[in-house]
């Protein structure tokens, strides 16, 4: 799968609509009745539909009721002004880049060589990765989406997601065998301290293939808002 993701960059999540003030009726005796759409909060319901990107040419698939496409949530592309270089032609959101730098220094102090394989990826690049490889491998859209997000639905486009590898085990790059490396074990024990979380753990509810190398930054209000829908879905 190493040819799926060139050494470059993966982007922003669905922004939720502002909440409306809850309408209420005051009855005799001090009783309060919740009315209108707010009443639905009293009962379980699917996650609110998110702002969705336009239809994708060449992709015969429908959005699910919670806004996902083939398991993936929609994400907007990071603003250029929020991206900074992390070396080797790769970019990340400045908040995530700072945390990643601190995490890599801590790993290095423990004798672990954390390598960045991919970070920010534009929607245009994601389109190329998704459709070109899909065509080369004669994959269906569903098969392709299990290992690569459709354009407009990749966490990498937010600037908050990163693919990591073990510098001492390049043979495990972008492979599920990465979870057998010292680098992955270190991430399991320490990544949360730097506000990085594994996006697609084994058996995840989104139905995306297990990706032990794919981590997202959740250490700012913007990042938390970006991944709110995915986090609520997993709970």
Image: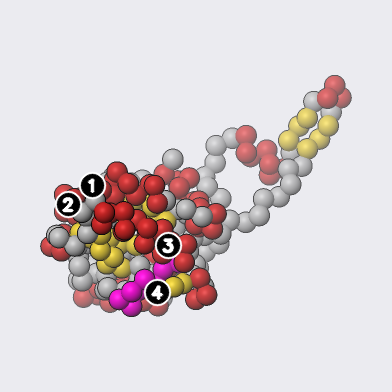
4 and 2 marks in contact (CB < 8 Å): no
Identify the image quadrant of residue 126: bottom left
Task: Identify residue for label 1.
Answer: 185
Task: Identify residue for label 4.
Answer: 85
Screen quadrant of the C terminus: top left
Screen quadrant of the N terminus: bottom left
> Which residue is found at the position 26% from the left and 54% from the top?
109
Identify the secondary structure beneath mark 4. Answer: strand
Task: Identify residue for label 2.
Answer: 181
Count of numbered badges drawn on the protein: 4
Identify the secondary structure beneath mark 3. Answer: helix
Compared to 187, does 80 lie above or below?
below
Q: Is residue 203 left or right of residue 111?
A: right
Q: Is residue 27 left or right of residue 47?
A: right
Cα separation between marks 3 and 2:
24 Å
Q: Residues within 10 Å of mark 1 (few under 14, many from 20)?
A: some
Q: Percent from the top left, x then y, of residue 120? A: 39, 69
Closer-to-camera residue (1/178): 178
Number of the front mark, 4 or 2 = 4
Cα separation between marks 3 and 4:
11 Å
Compared to 42, does 1 lie above or below?
below
Range covered by the magenta-colored residues = 86-93
Task: Identify residue for label 3.
Answer: 98
Identify the secondary structure beneath mark 2. Answer: loop
Q: Is residue 88 magenta?
A: yes
């Amino acid at each position: 799968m190493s040819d799926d993701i060139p050494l470059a960059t993966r982007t922003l999540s669905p922004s939720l609509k502002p909440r409306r003030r809850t309408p209420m009726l005051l009855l005799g005796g001090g009783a309060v009745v919740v009315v209108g759409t707010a009443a639905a909060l009293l009962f379980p319901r699917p996650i609110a539909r998110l702002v969705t990107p336009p239809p994708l040419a060449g992709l015969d698939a429908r959005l699910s009721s919670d806004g996902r496409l083939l398991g993936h949530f929609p994400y907007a592309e990071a603003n250029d002004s929020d991206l900074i270089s992390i070396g080797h032609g790769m970019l990340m959101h400045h908040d995530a880049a700072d945390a990643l730098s601190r995490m890599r220094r801590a790993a290095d102090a423990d004798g672990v060589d954390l390598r960045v394989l991919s970070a920010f990826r534009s929607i245009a690049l994601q389109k190329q990765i998704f459709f070109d490889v899909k065509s080369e491998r004669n994959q269906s859209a569903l098969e392709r989406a299990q290992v690569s997000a459709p354009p407009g639905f990749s966490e990498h486009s937010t600037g908050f997601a990163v693919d990591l590898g073990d510098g001492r085990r390049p043979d495990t790059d972008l492979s599920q065998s990465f979870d057998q490396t010292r680098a992955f074990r270190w991430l399991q024990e320490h990544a949360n301290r730097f506000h990085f979380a594994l996006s697609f753990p084994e058996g995840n509810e989104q139905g995306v293939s297990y990706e032990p190398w794919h981590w997202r930054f959740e250490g700012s209000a913007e990042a938390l808002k970006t991944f709110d829908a995915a986090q609520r879905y997993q709970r």
